[in-house]
Image: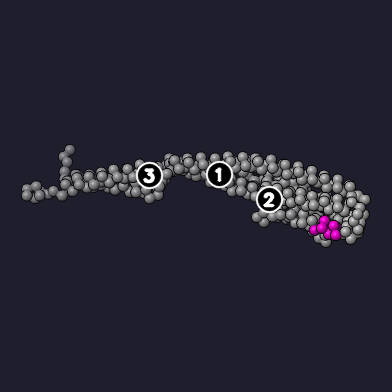
């Protein structure tokens, strides 16, 4: 085949165009830090990237769920601790009122404090986290305890409030509110308050026994939520490991090797300059230039 001047010029322009394309690709990689800017650049990398990114998004959502679970459990444990302190204080007051050396006025003064502690406990039972009542099971939009005219009424839901902390893993984050803020506890506190107000402490020892039973229930509930909290921390550690792994795989799939890209771009620029030099010699000469 006879090679003409036109063919040489066309080939030179084609090679220059390809050289520009290659330099553009490397410059895009440097500017974005990614191997590809369009799915058509490398469909395999693009498809894997979608899968890995979805996996990473799921992990990030589980981390947000874990934060919510932590908030519920820590708030629940704080509620148990507060209830424990209240019951302990009521027990101290009951022992003080039950020693037989108090005047009716003294007993009524003690009753006032017991009444305040009772209402304080009711307020704690209605604790909200992010606008939801955490001690009312799945009925998080309604308060479990109502106080009216010094009378406490408990209408508590005990269903498990679960949070998905991992793929297919749901963890209960609430406590059984009736074991901490149940009607029995408020009835006991009311009995103590009434006995102190009336000055009749004949059942003082029985009421002490009732308070001790509530202590046992509080301790059991604290132990139970403590065990679940430990499990939550283990899940959290695993989720953090998964996030690191997912981020690394995503980076390996999509991120450009900048050292290699810079080297390739430098080589391509050298090739492009050589191609320009050759093209200038091929296209420029004419018959007159040759005869000159």
Q: CA distance from mark 3 to mark 1?
A: 28 Å
Q: Position of residue 2 (x, y in %)?
A: 16, 39
Give the camera-side residue of 132 and 77: 77
Residue at left offset 82%, top offset 50%: 91
Magenta range is 109-116
| Visible residue check, residue 138 | no
Q: Nearer the viewer, mark 2 or mark 1?
A: 2
Q: CA distance from mark 3 to mark 2?
A: 48 Å
State which tag comes first along the sequence, 3 or 2.
2
Tag 3–tag 1 contact (CB < 8 Å): no
Tag 2–tag 1 contact (CB < 8 Å): no
User: Where does label 3 land, which residue?
Assistant: 258
Tag 3, which secondary structure? Answer: helix
| Visible residue check, residue 124 | yes
User: Where does label 2 land, which residue?
Assistant: 75
Q: Residue furthest front?
A: 101
Q: Residues within 10 Å of mark 1 (few under 14, many from 20)?
A: many
Q: Nearer the viewer, mark 3 or mark 1?
A: 3
Tag 2, which secondary structure? Answer: helix
Q: Position of residue 248 (x, y in %)?
A: 48, 41
User: Where does label 1 land, which residue?
Assistant: 59
State which tag comes first along the sequence, 3 or 1.
1
Question: In terms of image quadrants, where is residue 117?
Answer: bottom right
Q: Position of residue 245 (x, y in %)?
A: 51, 40
Q: Give the prevailing secondary structure in the magenta stretch.
A: helix
Q: Residue furthest left?
A: 292
Tag 3–tag 2 contact (CB < 8 Å): no
Tag count: 3
Q: Position of residue 32 (x, y in %)?
A: 40, 49
Residue at left offset 61%, top offset 46%: 66
Tag 1, which secondary structure? Answer: helix
């Amino acid at each position: 085949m006879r090679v003409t001047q036109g063919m040489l010029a066309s080939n030179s322009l084609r090679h220059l165009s390809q050289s520009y394309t290659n330099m553009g690709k490397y410059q895009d990689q440097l500017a974005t830090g990614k191997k590809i800017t369009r799915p058509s650049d490398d469909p395999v990398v693009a498809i894997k990237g979608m899968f890995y990114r979805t996996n990473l998004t799921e992990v990030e959502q589980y981390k947000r769920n874990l934060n919510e679970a932590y908030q519920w459990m820590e708030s629940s444990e704080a509620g148990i601790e507060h209830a424990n302190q209240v019951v302990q204080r009521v027990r101290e007051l009951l022992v003080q009122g039950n020693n037989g050396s108090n005047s009716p006025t003294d007993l009524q003064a003690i009753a006032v404090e017991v009444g305040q502690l009772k209402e304080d406990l009711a307020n704690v039972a209605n604790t909200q986290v992010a606008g939801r009542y955490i001690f009312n099971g799945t009925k998080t939009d309604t308060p479990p305890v109502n106080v009216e005219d010094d009378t406490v009424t408990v209408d508590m839901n005990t269903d498990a409030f679960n949070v998905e902390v991992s793929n297919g893993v749901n963890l209960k984050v609430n406590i059984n509110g009736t074991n901490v803020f149940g009607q029995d506890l408020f009835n006991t506190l009311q009995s103590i308050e009434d006995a102190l107000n009336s000055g009749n402490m004949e059942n003082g020892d029985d009421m002490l026994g009732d308070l001790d039973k509530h202590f046992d229930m509080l301790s059991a509930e604290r132990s139970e939520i403590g065990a679940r909290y430990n499990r939550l921390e283990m899940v959290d550690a695993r989720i953090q490991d998964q996030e690191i792994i997912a981020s690394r795989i995503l980076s390996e799939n999509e991120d450009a090797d900048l050292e290699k890209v810079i080297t390739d771009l430098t080589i391509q620029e050298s090739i492009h300059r050589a191609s320009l030099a050759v093209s200038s010699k091929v296209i420029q000469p004419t018959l007159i230039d040759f005869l000159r």
